[in-house]
Image: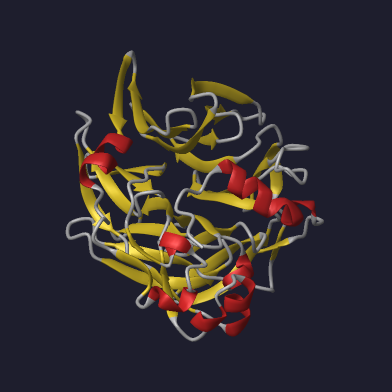
Amino acid sequence: MRSSRWSIAVAVASATALIAAPAASAHAGSAARTWTPKVLNSEVVAPFHLATNDGRLYVADGGTSTVSRVNGDGSLTMLAQGPMPGEVSGVAKTDNALAYTTLDYTTGEATLTVKRGSKTMVANLTAFETRRNPDQRVHYGFKDPSCANGALGDLAAYTGQVDSHAYAVTRWNGAWVVADAGGNDLVKVDDNGHVSLLSLLPPQPLLVSQEFADANGIPDCAGQRYKFEPVPTDVEVGMDGMLYVSTLPGGPEDPSAGARGSVYKVNPWTGAATRVATGFAGATSVTQGSDGTLYVAELFGGKVTAVRNGHKSTAAMLPGALAVEYGNGHLYAGTLAPTDDQGNPTGTGSIVRIR
């Protein structure tokens, strides 16, 4: 029931059916106007995150463990290679720096790398998580785990474990902010590589239905609440100076327990987190348009959803929607490659411009 580390293997295996579905036209928040996504590139495998700067588009491809610039003709110019086996998951670009997050599958080490010209700074997020483990006093699972009758082992009730998966990054107030999908938090990294806690996100409670309880072998737990981990998947700076964070619901990250993904607004000065939208089927990325509209990539919903004044609407039907980014006056998205039954890619994903 717990899965705080959201890796490419989980994403690919869970999204196969969605990506195999036929492509559909896009609607940018209104049935009165139809938008058709334009494919810019179809060489990527798992474009976890996109970034824009100075009219250019950048992509972190977890499938190839690379960071690349998307050129005007759609071709890719590789700027950095991540660990192999491993992944690059997050990317941010400023006028003089390229930042990206990585996870080494062999060592389990999660890092933030920042390149400025010939200089490179590497911050070890796993070392910070091991030393601090910010959610070590947060209780997940059931308040009374006896209902599970041992079926879930130590997952019936537990406190936060040491687990780091530096998944997304953005630049804020002269520092880097990293969404750690394993640590369930946002951490701040200064330009010297010092890591500190910015915000610990709240648990995600689920009222367990009888159907869900029966399916997971815990029939006596129906009617009780299970607190899942929040699993942040993206962080973006909003027009109001606040941080906007998308989260997966912990546990089953597919829709088997309902569409439970959320978006939080986090005050970067206090760390206080307020949920501003929920009900997403796999919220893997978030961005904000020039008019304040939030856009959320729903991996398991196969679409990009617009959120404005608390109201949700479909901005684009996009099977395998994995990343979304507003910049250069455009809304961009990335889709995941199709896979076989073992989760191995059988084709490529894409980078598209929605509007």
The residue lying at 27 percent from left, 58 percent from top is 200
Q: Quadrant of residue 305?
A: bottom right
In this view, the residue farthest toward the right is 22
Which of these two is toward me, 252 or 88? 252
Query: Relative to 130, is 354 above or below?
Result: below
Quarter location, residue 74? top right
Rendered residue at 48%/59% (across/down): 2
Name the residue: 74% across, 43% down: 339
Q: Is residue 141 above or below residue 245?
A: below
Residue 268 in the image: above or below residue 167: below
Relative to 160, 286 lies left or right: right
Note whether residue 30 is visible: yes
Residue 16 left/right relative to 227? right
| Residue 233, position as x, y percentages in the image | 45, 52
Residue 257: % across, % down: 58, 72
Work out whether residue 138 or residue 270 is closer to the camera in this orientation and state it: 138
Residue 149 rendering spot, x and y as whole percentages: 48, 73
Residue 144, percent from left and from top: 36, 78
Residue nearest the observer in this picture, 349 or 223? 223
